[in-house]
Amino acid sequence: MTAPAKSKLRLGLIAGLGILITLGAVTIRAEWGLSQAEKFAAMEDWRAVRKQLDWYLRLHPRSARAHLLMARAFASDRQFDADAAQAAIGHLDQVSLDSEFAASAQLDAGRLELLGLHRPRHAERHFRQAIDLDPQLFQAQFLLWKVWELTGRARQAEPEFWRVYELSPQQTRIVRLREWYLSQFYPEFANAPLDQTLGFLRPQETPTDLVERRRLDRFREAEPNEPLAAIAIAQWYQRRGDLQAARKALNELSATIDAAYDDPYFVATLVAVLLELGDFDRAQQAFDQWPAEDRQHAYWRSHAILLDDADANYADAVAAYDKALAIWPGPIDWRTQARKANCLARTGQMEQAQLARQA
């Protein structure tokens, strides 16, 4: 080998060795950065945590531990805001669903969506994903139930509640039952502590339906492309007796969101409002679009009223009323029980009608 060739080889080996040394140093620096980040986390120095993890994640972009710690650093910082919440969720979404930390990551993402960004539908999706990954994850099930309550669906949340009850320790089940009772009969008080945490219930303020409206307006603002909060607002108008405002809100929603009729909550609320207005033709048209997977109390009650008031088909109406009354909140729905009694009386079944009135 000639001298120039030997010189080139020597320079190449030196350059290669330099690259290996540099890469080794970077790798050692990154690994050291993860351990340092964990130490800074113990001291709650979240900015330092993020700085250290930046190095580590460049070399290990799929590290679940690092993404979870980075998310915690964003969520725990004193300067926590919507941007920090988004950044934290972005890191939690990087945790693979086959990771041992996946359920925890989805739970934390749901918490941030609800408590930090006020996006209940986004939160609901994360909680459901966490439950799919770990059916025993109590906090995910509990917060899913609360999302239903916060969005006007407390009466439809019985399955979610009983799952929470089953997962609750024996000594706390009485507390869960009390929470359930409040949600069904005094919903404005059921989530007062959570409304305070979310910033909707002000200090020394008494919970009212105006607090609920404040919450729903914020939810709608935070999720403009989701129908959930807008439906709940229409239902809020309905409960206050402002049926025209309720119908207007629902019509605006169906005009802007193509998939509105795919949501049983939307169809149930629209049909209920139209029935109260006496617009049976429009109610029937909406009822015919009820999603096939939903056959709960609201479906059978609406079906019964259409058979009863619009078609005068009292025999079939009674059967539909019975199905509605068998599904929660049927057992406490005295208005539907009274409708059934009147329907029975029209068919001459006076004894059964009297029993229905007593019930």
Image (cartoon, helix red, strand yellow):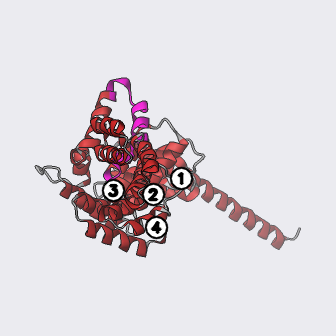
Q: Is residue 67 left or right of residue 230?
A: right
Mark 2, residue position = 264
Residue 270 in sight: yes
In percent of width and height, residue 102 lies at: 53, 46
Find the distance from the CA under tag 2 to the CA under tag 1.
9 Å
User: In this picture, is 14 found above or below 139?
Assistant: below
Q: Which mark is residue 293?
A: 1
| Disc 3 residue crowd, few under 14, some 14–19, many 20+, Cα 10 Å | some
What segment carries the magenta color? Answer: 150-173
- Give x and y (percent) for residue 296: 45, 48
Q: Amino acid at mark 4?
A: Gln
* Residue bearing the label numbered 3: 116
Contact, CB < 8 Å: mark 2 with mark 4? Answer: no
Between marks 1 and 3 in the image, the one whose residue lies nearer the viewer? 1
Q: Amino acid at mark 1?
A: Glu
Give the distance between the C-alpha atoms of the residues marked 1 and 3, in whole angstroms.
Answer: 32 Å
Spatial CA span between label 2 and label 3: 27 Å
Give the answer, above or below, for where 261 lies relative to 29. below
- CA distance separating discs 1 and 4: 18 Å
Which residue, given by chain and number where applicable, does mark 4 sit on? 285
Type of amino acid at the residue the image marks with label 3: Gly
Q: Secondary structure at mark 4?
A: helix
Q: Earlier in the sequence, mark 1 or mark 3?
A: 3
